Image (cartoon, grey):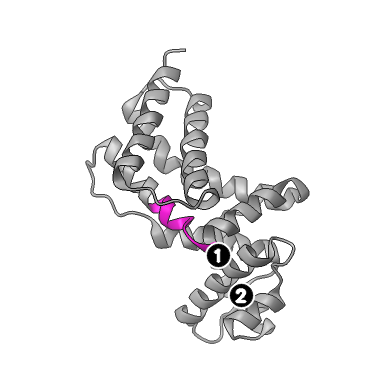
Amino acid sequence: MPDVSQQTSHEQERGRGRPRDPRKDAAIRDAAWDVLADRGYEGLTFEAVAELAGCSRTTLYRRFASKSALIATMLYETSREVEPHLPEGTPPKAVLLGHVDAFITYVSGKRGRGIVSLTEAISRSPELREITQMHKRQEREHYYTAFRALAPDVSEDHMAFVFDTLVGMVLHHTATDVRDLPSDKREALVDSAIFLLRWTAQV
């Protein structure tokens, strides 16, 4: 499967001939998240997204070759929208806190319900599993850089375990229980991840 960023560029090329309207792109992305949250993966159709976004299905087909391409673009572009801009030299713990804050923004509201819907559908769709796993591999590198700075000898398996644990805890509190996570609780989750990282680095 191609890189998501390459896939996004490919989708943009398909619409060459008239300038892309970023406001329409954002409306389509927001509508897709809303449909996914309210109707689930199976209910995410171009017809439903087009109706909610106020555009035609042809507009969607010009941008996305398939439902999978739409989902890949949703995941990638939403990540870039909330991605923290951290100056060079930011301490590793602050990097983790910045990305946890961004992830909470990502999975707040209907987007969180949409992510849960995707997670539930993964077992029924190998293609969806591949898309989400590819996205996960890209996004976790931001965390891995901080992990390596905190525990240089930690293995890939241990980093994956700590990443999944941290992200899973944040997703549970934000999208499943739908509770607010104030700054002290966010820091507590990051501190727990750092403790687990350093513990696993020794086993």
Kindly identify the residue that appears in the image at 40 percent across and 59 percent down.
82
Q: Is residue 164 above or below residue 111?
A: above
Q: Secondary structure at mark 1?
A: helix
Q: Which residue is the site of mark 1?
A: 8
Q: Earlier in the sequence, mark 1 or mark 2?
A: 1
Q: Secondary structure at mark 2?
A: helix
On the image, the x and y values in percent for residue 93 come to: 29, 36
On the image, the x and y values in percent for residue 49 come to: 64, 75
- Residues in magenta? 102-110
Residue 119 located within the stretch drawn in magenta: no
Looking at the image, which residue sits at the far top? 203
Q: Is residue 133 above or below residue 107?
A: above
Q: Is residue 128 above or below residue 144?
A: below
On the image, the x and y values in percent for residue 88 come to: 23, 45
Query: Magenta part mainly helix, strand or loop?
Result: helix
As measured in the structure, the alpha-carbon distance from the residue carrying label 1 to the one carrying label 2 is 9 Å
Mark 2: amino acid: Arg
Q: Is residue 139 left or right of residue 88?
A: right
On residue 63, which mark appears? 2
On residue 96, which mark appears? none
Mark 1: amino acid: Thr
